[in-house]
Image (spheres, grey):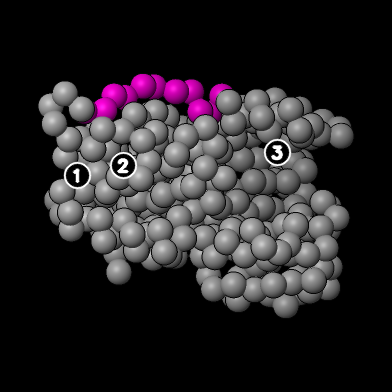
Amino acid sequence: MLFGSSGIRQEFSPGLVELALRIGAATADDASTIVVGRDTRMTSELLEHSIVSGMLSAGATVYSCGIAPTPTVAHATGCVDAGCMITASHNPESYNGVKLFNPDGSSFTLRQQAAIEEGLRGTHWKNWDEQGHTFPVDAVDAHRETILDQVSLERPITTVLDCGNGAGSVITPDLLAGAGATVIGLNCNVAGRFARPSEPLEANLPYIGEIVRRREAACAVIHDGDADRMMAFDERGRYIDGDHLLMLFAKYLDRKRVVTTVDASMAIEEVAEVHRTPVGDSFVSEELLSWGDFGGEASG
């Protein structure tokens, strides 16, 4: 199968450009309106043009977000038939890929992904007078305002933020500042090359703890390349892994039925009843349709 648990990810090649074109056309078979966004990788703009061309050739109307985090694209998909993110998430810069979303923000299921793969074998091109159209949208501003309408800080704090030169750079600094935080930004400029390894593992972030302590910050927030992952440090500069973040969020929100993946720590069962799925956010989302009031992965 081309698709894995988090969409398609592979090292960039001319073949990936052609594949993006065909995926775009196949996606438009069942979706007449589609939101498309991309991360900051050097190949993402090219792949966006390719996949959008496929969608247009199949007659779809495409709303282009430009550079946007994966969660922002998922949020924007609520207004259309499908969403598409060009990203390889936390993988190195030489990789790229495609992730597809349903209108409820969930990732395409294995069945939906299999249907797209089957559709790659067909011909989807419309006549010259049936081609689609593209319109720009500001999905980032809409997402930020939606969050700020629901969240505010109880007191002013100082936060260290490392976006890793990824798509989080276009929303998280303003989001935290809008909520009332003083933000100390690191790698928060959009760049096609990452200043550090994209995955927010403790081993990739040896400098964060010292900055938190020196600046007397309340915490640090760390993103990967498309900002679908978030890890943290506490006020003493100690790394907080995904298992503990999952526990903290469930306890803070008072959620008693949590869906997570099989690789998550047993510790989550100390604060909630737990259902486990295979690794991948699509599995977590699908399980939440029938059970649970909170879900997440320990990967961030």
In this rendered view, identify the residue nearer to me: 296 or 227: 296
Q: Earlier in the sequence, mark 1 or mark 2?
A: 2
Say which element carries label 1: loop
Residue 65 placement (x, y as % from top left): 42, 29
Q: Amino acid at mark 3?
A: Thr
Q: Amino acid at mark 1?
A: His
Q: CA distance from mark 3 to mark 2?
A: 42 Å
Say which element carries label 3: strand
Q: Closer to the camera: disc 1 or disc 3?
A: 1
Q: Residues within 10 Å of mark 1 (few under 14, many from 20)?
A: many
**Residue carrying label 3:** 159
Looking at the image, which residue is at 54% across and 60% down? 281
Q: Amino acid at mark 2?
A: Ala
Q: Earlier in the sequence, mark 3 or mark 2?
A: 2
Q: Check the image and report above or below for 248 versus 33.
A: below
Does the CB distance between marks 1 and 2 fall below 8 Å?
A: yes
Q: Is 134 contained in the magenta span?
A: yes
Q: Is 222 contained in the magenta span?
A: no
**Residue carrying label 2:** 28
Looking at the image, which residue is at 29% across and 64% down? 2
Q: Quadrant of the C terminus?
A: bottom right
Q: Residues within 10 Å of mark 3 (few under 14, many from 20)?
A: many
Q: Residues within 10 Å of mark 2 (few under 14, many from 20)?
A: many
Q: Earlier in the sequence, mark 1 or mark 3?
A: 1
Looking at the image, which residue is at 31% across and 24% down? 134
Which dot marks residue 23? none
Residue 148 placement (x, y as % from top left): 71, 29
Left/right of residue 262 with respect to residue 216 in the rendered view: left
Q: Which residues are magenta?
A: 131-141
Say which element carries label 2: helix
**Residue carrying label 1:** 124
